[in-house]
Amino acid sequence: MNQDTLKNLCIESCEVIREVGIFIKHELGKVQASAIETKALNSLVSYVDKEAEKQLVKGLNALLPEATFLTEEETVKSEAGEYQWIIDPLDGTTNFLHQLPFFSVSVGLQHKEEIIIGIVYEVNRKECFYAWKGGGAFLNDKKIQVTKTAQLGDTLIATGFPYYDYEHMQAYLGVLENLMRNTRGLRRLGSAALDLAYVACGRFDAYFEYSLNAWDVAGGILLVKEAGGELSDFKGGDDYLFGRQLIAGNPQILKALQGLIRENFYPNS
Ligand code: 2AM
Ligand code: CA
């Protein structure tokens, strides 16, 4: 795909996602407790997630019929392919169901193991964050960039608290304590996709979390890269799309976080 084709596909995909955002917003506050299912410990889902996913699959399939899908709610068969859409129709479901304003739609297009389009749509503020490979990252038509903050003491850092895998709790709390003492503050919004989008546009200096799924991060990874940021897994490697752990940030703060996470999670390495 050349740059023009990729850009057009990205912009058209944003339109599909905006439409789905209208549906999600329309359902806010309407989901009855009896319509909420628990998929796994603390992992909630309702008809809104599933219907939004069906709409996304239909709209995106029309734009690129040869692409396969990997989706959180599995309303379509997961298949590998040269092009694959990786979709979280509603990232931040717990917030949505509690009527807290931080939830988003996250879509990434993978081509041969590389994300080439990334889109995160913040439903409440109608903020569409999007990037295509080689084209830069944007928020509603304006180019975005990660921060230039160099000192940890000047940073605002996002994270996600463990909500079902408590195995690394001590290491995680060790990192948190250090950051509480040495940064401007920590935030936990509850949508990994939005955390990445907010790193890309400079609202956060960095973000880290573990026990993530590929659909939580596929939309946001390219946003961070195209906005001048960097990403790694907890060991400093590249296994952050399917590796379930991720650190993202401006390059200097990413390094500081990598060191801190290594000290706490892998003290003997
Ligand atoms: P989800 O809303 O699509 O399930 C990282 O925190 C990710 O974990 C979130 O983006 C969220 O994606 C998912 N998640 C599932 N259950 C959660 C919970 N109880 N608290 C926080 N995040 C949860
Ligand atoms: Ca979801």
Image (tube, rainbow, N blue to C red):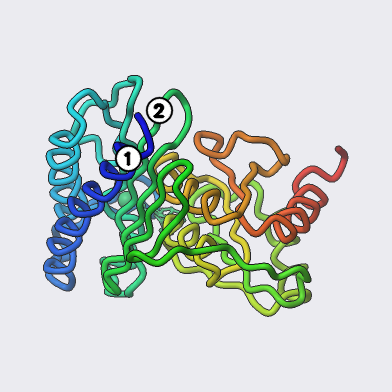
Q: Secondary structure at mark 1?
A: helix
Farthest-out residue, right = 268
Q: Between residues 180 and 204, which one lies in front from this camera angle? A: 204
Amino acid carrying label 2: it is His
Rendered position, 145 above or below 85: below
Left or right of 221: which side holds 205?
A: right
Residue assigned mark 1: 4
Q: What kind of element bears circle 2?
A: strand
Can you identify the residue that label 2 sits on? Answer: 111
- Point out residue 211 in the picture as x, y percentages from the top left corner: 53, 45
Residue 190 placement, left or right of 181: left
Q: Residues within 10 Å of mark 1 (few under 14, many from 20)?
A: few
**Residue 196 at what x, y percent from top left?**
49, 57
Pick the quarter of the image with the N terminus: top left
How far across and down, in percent of the image, does residue 257 sit? 73, 57
**Ligand 1 lies in which image quarter?**
bottom left
Along the line of sight, which residue is nearer the eye, 195 or 72? Answer: 195
